[in-house]
Amino acid sequence: MTSAAAGLFLVAPAGLSPALAARLGALLQRRLLDPLPGSAQAPEQQLQQLLDLPGGWLQPLAVDPASDVSERVPASCWAELLGAWRFRTCLLVSEEDRRSGRARSQVVLLQHYKVPLLGVVQCGGPWLPQARRRDGLPWLGWLADAQADPVEALEEERELQRLLRLRLGPAGL
């Protein structure tokens, strides 16, 4: 049996797209699990099963972490459940999520429920490191979209990979 530190949850304001999860899984060289549906009948049982897996997994959440959990679970939302189980989590946001304040709201929600948040990754849009530092959010980096300069995108992807591996530490590799 392993601990919650053996894997990593991926969450996003509207749930995570499978393509984005696969891209991050490849970048981190981690075993990508099927997305955990928000309508899970027995979410605590599913989380317990994750603890029995060997380390190095990546678990996308298919719904917003603020979404309700099953009525049979005492947690009010997925963020509360992730915090209670102490699952390390990475928040992925779009440029629109950042501009609209959803990224900030999601960070506050995850911090409120004491979710071990490794940081925030911006997906697409322009990457402006100085502006992101002013945001005051725990930014890890950027996953570029197809319109980005390929050289800059590769450099930033390598930096994101390095930072995530540092934050995951030896227990999560």
Image (spheres, rainbow, N blue to C red):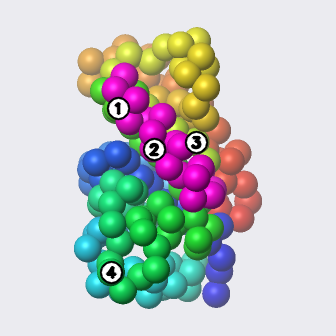
- Per the rendered image, the range of residues in magenta is 99-117
Which one is nearer the viewer's eye here, 41 or 163?
41
Q: Is the residue 50 above or below the residue 163 in the image? A: below
Is the Cβ of the residue at disc 1 closer than 8 Å to that at disc 2?
A: yes
Judging by the rendered image, the residue that carries numbered circle 1 is: 97
Q: Residue 82 in the image: state x and y as whole percent.
A: 52, 66
Helix, strand or loop under label 2: helix
Does label 4 or label 1 sit earlier along the sequence? 4
State the image quarter where residue 158 is shown: top right
Q: Where 166 falls versus 121 (above or below)? A: below
Residue at which label 4 appears: 71
Q: Quadrant of the N terminus?
A: bottom right
Name the amino acid type tagged 1: Asp
Residue sitting nearer the eye, 14 or 70: 70
Q: On residue 106, which mark appears?
A: 2
Magenta portion: prevailing SS class: helix
